[in-house]
Image: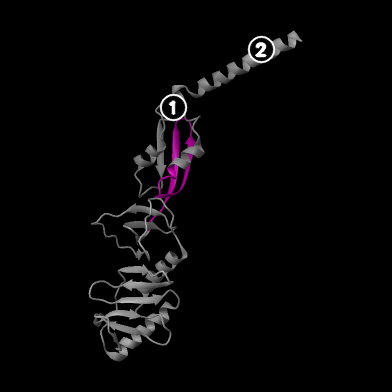
Amino acid sequence: MLKVLGVLLVLAGTGAGLWEGYRGLLRLPYFRVAEIQVEGNLQVATQDIIASLSLAPDTSVLEVDLPALTGRVLENPWIKEASVRRRLPLSLTIRVVERMPEAVFIADRRYLLSADGVILAELGEGELPTLPTLRAATARRVAIGERILTSEMVQGLSVWRQFQLANALQGEKAHEIAMAGDGTYVVNLGQRMPAIRLRAQDMEGQLGRLGAALSASGQALERFGDVDLRFRDRVIFKLAGGTTARP
């Protein structure tokens, strides 16, 4: 019995020694990460992606936790997909797929919004990107990195695209799409132009009725303050002072 116990102790000691030797090998200066390459980034600076890894200067390329490093990279809202791989003997390679701004979202402030509904950044006062502008039905607080996409917002972006492609308004372009909260949208055409209320469905029919009404009357669109296209059998025009008018 004592002999068996002695053998076990020897084996345990040998195993512990081998393990410590293995860990010491991994931590040799030769295996320290000497280079980190970043691929696929346009919006996020390379140095910012590398800094997000939070690697110690003496980190061994053989000991890094690749899934954990990938998770750190993905904490940046601009980065949609990421992978971190070893490239022996001394390098790491980070590949990213970035989100692109799809719209300006106005809630409590103005934000850049990605196609999958992630708040990317807050816009400064002087920043005026040429992107669709969606205004929330009510003011709300949002956080950078928050995913806020709803079916109403998806439809709002669709309204923007369809409106920009329509020819019924003789080149007028939407400045802003406001979500009304009841499933309808208000298109703001800018200064000295009316606000147009419409539904997301049958955009072509609604704008066609508007174009036909204006053509038949010979009136200019800028004469009016508001135009309501939500009804299938009529177009409602209101003068700038609020009086209902027929063109």
Which residues are drawn in magenta? 73-101
* Residue tagged 1: 32
- Residue 211 placement (x, y as % from top left): 34, 84
Q: Position of residue 234 (x, y in %)?
A: 39, 87
Color encoding of the figure: one colour
What is the x, y in percent for residue 22?
A: 55, 21
Amino acid type for the residue under numbered disc 1: Arg
Secondary structure at numbered mark 2: helix
Of mark 1 and mark 2, the one earlier in the sequence is 2
Classed neighbour count for the residue bearing mark 1: other residues with Cα under 10 Å, few (<14), some (14–19), many (≥20): many
Does residue 202 lie above or below 181 as drawn?
below
Q: Are marks 1 and 2 in contact (CB under 8 Å)?
A: no
For image coordinates 47% across by 22% down, the residue present is 28
Relative to 72, residue 31 above or below:
above
Q: Residue furthest right?
A: 1
On the rendered image, what quadrant is the N terminus found in?
top right
Amino acid carrying label 2: it is Val
Q: Main secondary structure of the magenta part?
A: strand
Q: Is residue 169 visible?
A: no
Q: Residue at x 24, y 56 (%)?
A: 125
Element on which disc 1 rests? loop
Q: Is residue 33 magenta?
A: no
> What percent of the width, then of the height, locates residue 242?
27, 81
| Viewer-proximal residue among 175 and 34 | 175
Residue wearing tag 2? 10
Q: Please say if 101 is above or below 210.
A: above
Residue at the location (44% across, 27% down)? 32
Q: Is residue 227 left or right of residue 62?
A: left
Q: Nearer the viewer, residue 58 or 158?
A: 158
Q: Residue at x 40, y 42 (%)?
A: 38
Would residue 84 be counted in the magenta stretch?
yes
